[in-house]
Image (tube, helix red, strand yellow):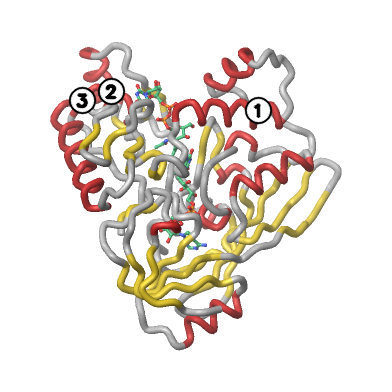
């Protein structure tokens, strides 16, 4: 466990932004974490897979790359299993492990980049499922008093791309493990339109969890850029939730605008659609821009600065506000 100085963070963020961290260390267990924190007086950044971050400047503190591994069975019945997963495990590898073992519940979230430890941060989700649907507990190291705390699902206050770890408790905890409850008998969820269509295209009528995973992987690969080839952080903005009156005003002008009713009476609008309508889709400015297949994804074609991508996101927010009266909120964490 070596604290390195002036390290490039380029390999540690999927946007591929070349900034430096004043100090950098990888930890593989809680004792190492405690040892690192004991003599530290620098500000902290916890790094998972770096797939939901935009660095706009050098990080003048200590970046801690989380490498806490391990999979253990917490409890098991004939119908369910509870697994505790180390925060540094790669999310998609965990999904593949579950598929291999026949544990259902995470297959719709196949191919989401990043680590298990970051999954509760913004309550990751895709294709009709959110991680809150399968999380029972989050274990975290309290960065103030060094205690280990366990948060039940309810206490995490999960919502659309949010939890207490991104809001009221931001910066207070290092998530060390997450416990998931999975089903041994699959309850296949293909209600999200694109999955049904993809399964039909694959000529599958009675899908297994592996089939659902493969369908999701196909859909995602067809429109989301692979960060190994083009730098990005997935959706840059959240899909905004608007009032019924506001949704109706937009539909008067654009009758085909995608919108999804929410439990609270609001309507989720597709930010990708709003951004596309404002003419941004596929727009390239030097070596960065808006992806040509998904307008919600900002991209670094190589060598762009985070501050340039941030400035582009400001312009997009302004134009969507001017056209639709909606203020987009960033999903990506800005540093
Ligand atoms: P990082 O980017 O390393 O960290 C994100 C934030 O969490 C930072 O603030 C960091 O400090 C904090 N953090 C990380 N680990 C810990 C920890 N152990 N304890 C405390 N804080 C921590 N997201 C979705 O929800 N759905 C999608 O479908 C989706 N698709 C994507 C597709 C692509 C191509 C890409 C690049 C990203 C996508 N994302 C998606 C976003 C991203 O994959 C998720 O947000 C993921 O959970 C981030 O994990 P990470 O380990 O890379 O976190
Ligand atoms: N759309 C457009 N133009 C675009 C992009 C999308 O018109 O350029 C339209 C689509 O045609 C569709 C609607 O917008 O009618 C929704 O598009 P899509 O199904 O691609 O999903 P999304 O809302 O853009 C969200 C999540 C993704 C997640 C997918 C699948 C957010 C912010 N994004 O994207 O999550 O993978 O649904 O469930 O909620 C992420 O968070 O990083 C992420 C990639």
Which residue matches tag 2? Answer: 247
Crowding around mark 3 (Cα neighbors within 10 Å: few <14, some 14 to 19, many 20+) is: some
Q: Using residue 282 as the reference point, say whether residue 137 is left or right of it.
A: right
Which residue matches tag 1? Answer: 212
Looking at the picture, how far across and down is residue 89, in whole percent? 62, 56
Q: Is residue 145 visible?
A: no
Looking at the picture, how far across and down is residue 205, in whole percent? 71, 14
Instruction: Kindly report the distance in space between the C-alpha atoms of the residues bearing marks 3 and 2.
Output: 17 Å
Of the numbered discs 2 and 1, the one sitting upstream in the chain is 1
Crowding around mark 2 (Cα neighbors within 10 Å: few <14, some 14 to 19, many 20+) is: many
Looking at the picture, how far across and down is residue 308, in whole percent? 21, 48
Looking at the picture, how far across and down is residue 264, in whole percent? 40, 34
Q: How many marks?
A: 3
Tag 1 secondary structure: helix
3 and 1 marks in contact (CB < 8 Å): no
Tag 3 secondary structure: loop
Of the numbered discs 3 and 2, the one sitting upstream in the chain is 2
Q: Is residue 32 visible?
A: yes
Identify the residue at image location x=61%, y=24%. 190
Up the image or down, 189 lies above or below 236; here it is above
In the picture, the quarter occupied by the N terminus is bottom right
Crowding around mark 1 (Cα neighbors within 10 Å: few <14, some 14 to 19, many 20+) is: many
Residue sitting nearer the eye, 303 or 59: 303
Query: In which quarter of the view is residue 254 placed?
Result: top left
Residue sitting nearer the eye, 182 or 195: 195
Which residue matches tag 3? Answer: 278
Instruction: Kindly report the distance in space between the C-alpha atoms of the residues bearing marks 2 and 1.
Output: 32 Å
Tag 2 secondary structure: helix
Query: In which quarter of the view is residue 324 placed?
Result: top left
């Amino acid at each position: 466990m070596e604290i390195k100085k002036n390290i490039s963070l380029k390999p540690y963020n999927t946007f591929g932004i070349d900034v430096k961290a004043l100090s950098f260390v990888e930890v593989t267990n809680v004792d190492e974490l405690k040892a690192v924190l004991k003599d530290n007086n620098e500000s902290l950044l916890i790094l998972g897979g770096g797939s939901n971050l935009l660095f706009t400047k050098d990080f003048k503190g200590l970046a801690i790359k989380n490498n806490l591994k391990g999979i253990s069975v917490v409890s098991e019945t004939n119908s369910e299993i509870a697994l505790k997963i180390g925060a540094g495990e790669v999310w998609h590898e965990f999904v593949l492990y579950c598929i291999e073992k026949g544990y259902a519940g995470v297959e719709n979230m196949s191919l989401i980049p990043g680590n298990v430890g970051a999954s509760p941060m913004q309550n990751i989700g895709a294709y009709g499922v959110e991680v809150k649907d399968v999380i029972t507990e989050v274990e975290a190291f309290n960065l103030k008093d060094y205690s280990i705390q366990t948060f039940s699902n309810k206490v995490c206050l999960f919502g659309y791309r949010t939890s207490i770890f991104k809001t009221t408790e931001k910066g207070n905890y290092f998530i060390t493990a997450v416990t998931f409850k999975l089903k041994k008998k699959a309850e296949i969820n293909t209600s999200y339109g694109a999955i049904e269509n993809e399964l039909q295209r694959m000529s599958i009528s009675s899908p297994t969890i592996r089939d659902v995973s493969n369908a999701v992987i196909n859909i995602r690969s067809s429109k989301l850029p692979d960060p190994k080839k083009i730098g990005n952080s997935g959706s840059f903005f959240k899909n905004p939730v608007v009032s019924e009156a506001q949704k109706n005003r937009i539909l008067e002008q654009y009758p085909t605008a995608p919108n999804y009713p929410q439990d609270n009476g609001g309507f989720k609008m597709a930010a990708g659609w709003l951004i596309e309508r404002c003419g941004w889709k596929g727009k390239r400015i030097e070596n960065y821009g808006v992806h040509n297949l998904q307008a919600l994804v900002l991209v670094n074609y190589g060598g762009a600065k985070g501050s340039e991508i941030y400035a582009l996101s400001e312009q997009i927010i302004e134009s969507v506000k001017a056209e639709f009266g909606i203020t987009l909120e960033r999903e990506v964490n800005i540093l």
